[in-house]
Image (cartoon, grey):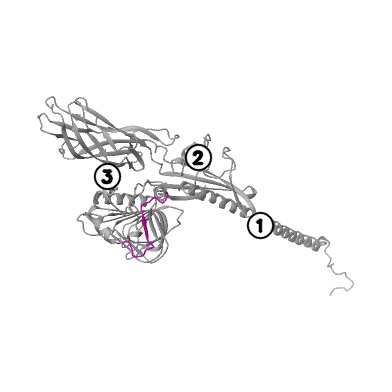
Amino acid sequence: MQNPSTPKPSLNRPGERGAALVMTLLIALLLLGAGGALIATTAMSATTASDSTAEMQAYYIAESGMQSALNALRGNTKPLVTSTDRMSFRTAVIPDISNGPGNTGALRLAGWLPYNDRTNPSSLVPVTIGSITGGYRVTVQNLDPNSNIVQFQTSGWISGSDSATPNQRTFGTVGGTDEVTIRYNGQGSTTLNPDPNVYPLTVDSQLGSFVIARPVTSTQDGVVIPRTDFELTITQTLPWVASAVFEASVQGTVNTTSTTLQVTFHKVAMKADGTNFALNFGGGSKILNLNYTASPGTTAIPVRVTSPDPKRLLLRSYGFGPRGSEKRLEMLLSHVNLDFDAPAGVTFQGADDCSAPTFDSGSSGAKWYSGIDYSGVDPQRPSFAVTGCDSDDIAAGIVKHDTVVDPEIGVLASDDSVAGTVERPNFLDTANKARSYLNSLQAEAQSINRYYKPGSGGTVTVNDALDSPTFTFVDGDCTLANGAGFLVVTGTLTMRGNTSFRGVILVLGTGVVVRNGGGNGNILGGITIARFDRTTGGFLSPTFTTNGGGNSTIQYDSQSLNRALRSGSNVSGIREF
């Protein structure tokens, strides 16, 4: 039993004195740290939000630069310091034009975009977003640097020639005093390399030559060479594989020491995937006079060759926003070279068997058809261009003649040398040529992702801006609301009375155009209609019908056509870098 007087063990722990204070201080320190972290995080969030806003503004400024440059490259803006009427893929990559005269640094479209100082490579195009100001700088790079190099050769065919020697034909009696041989000597492989920095990229060359040959026994004067068809084919291998055909006729007389023989070409110029081959006879003449003083007499065919535009450009936009923010975007642009000429406001290719077309110009007195150039540049053309056997049917289908400007009708022909005729586009010479042309347009559209095919029984609706011309290929039925550029339709094209369009409309294949309803739409440029099967056969009879009121117009317009031919560009990709 414990003695009560024995002291109990002490409950005090001297080694633990002040622990509560330490714990309190530690907890307070922890809370202080957490509070500080919260305050820092809050402050950083505000800064991050501010930086994010600045970064987003720089992004939109860079995007603004992309859109402005794209607008210039599509020919929608006039030059600021250059003499070139519209920008193109070629002028975009020539320093004196892209940057302005004398500025040979990085290509940056300073001749087209409003930089603060075009002579300073670091200068920016100013951009204001509310109270925030910034700017962008654009650069452009040619991804087809050898597109200036043109390589080609030629061959020829003379009507009535032997299949073994298609390039020559003998007239008169073989072995007789009137024997005359007309021969075309093709141009061998020729490479032209114009300076890519001097615009335009043009070099003079030749397309072969004509030879008049007479044996010593051929002594008769006044040997008549009747009108004989001739075709000169250009086969291009650089910068891209392509071909073009000059059509012509040979006619005149040959004497022993002279000749009146002439070669009359149907066109002054032809294009092969953008390369322009222009006959250089002087004054825009289509006639080549063949020289002859003795056998053989040789006459060269002079030509002026202009290199095509590059097909790919890399566009970069550097956007600079507040707080030192910067964003960079790059865009790959793809381009196709389009070729077309409108002989009238509306062109009909009729059936090979002269089957009557279905045509109705509309009973409304407010409709208007005209071949007068809306832009006032080109000479007047007929309101309608038709094949010869359809002219009476088209005339009968013009319900109100006071709505069609004279000359109402022009007859499509191989050339326009006869009064009342207009030169037929080459692709309408035969249905096979039309098929080939249509197939090439389809391939071009697919290459830049501008090919559209509606589902079974469906239709594609085109409703684009009038100031942004684009290349569109609809493989089937199409409803056109509005648009601009180069439109190809293989099915039925349906338009409303208020439909407006500026550029080229090709309805090739089904060959049916229907305008329904009232409205005040204007079609400026040129419409061409031809009906044919996509695989075989000749031309069939097309259809064009109009009904409804309103002040709608279809009129030839050279400016809209020119802009349409430059509309074959598309954005292939865009990314930050």
Residue 409 location, quadrant: bottom left
Q: Position of residue 524 (x, y in %)?
A: 40, 54
| Callout 1 amino acid | Ser
Q: Residue at x 24, y 56 (%)?
A: 390
Residue picked out by circle 3:
415
Q: Give the camera-side residue of 43 and 475.
A: 475
Label located before the other in sequence (2 or 1) = 1
Q: Position of residue 467 (x, y in %)?
A: 46, 54
Q: Is residue 374 left or right of residue 47?
A: left
Q: Which residues are magenta?
A: 360-375
| Callout 2 amino acid | Thr
Q: Nearer the viewer, mark 3 or mark 2?
A: 3
Q: Give the camera-side residue of 172 and 74.
A: 172
Q: Nearer the viewer, mark 1 or mark 3?
A: 3
Q: Position of residue 317 (x, y in %)?
A: 53, 46
Neighbourhood count class around disc 2 (C-alpha, 10 Å): few under 14, some 14–19, many 20 upward? some
Q: Position of residue 377 (x, y in %)?
A: 41, 46
Question: Which label number is shown at residue 208?
Answer: none
Q: Residue at x 52, y 39 (%)?
A: 99
Q: Main secondary structure of the magenta part?
A: loop
Residue 423 appearing in the image: no
Residue 517 location, quadrant: bottom left
Residue picked out by circle 2:
82
Count the labels in the image.
3
Q: Give the camera-side residue of 373 and 531.
A: 373
Residue extending farthest to the front is 402
Gap between marks 2 and 1, in whole Å? 48 Å
Quadrant containing the N terminus is bottom right
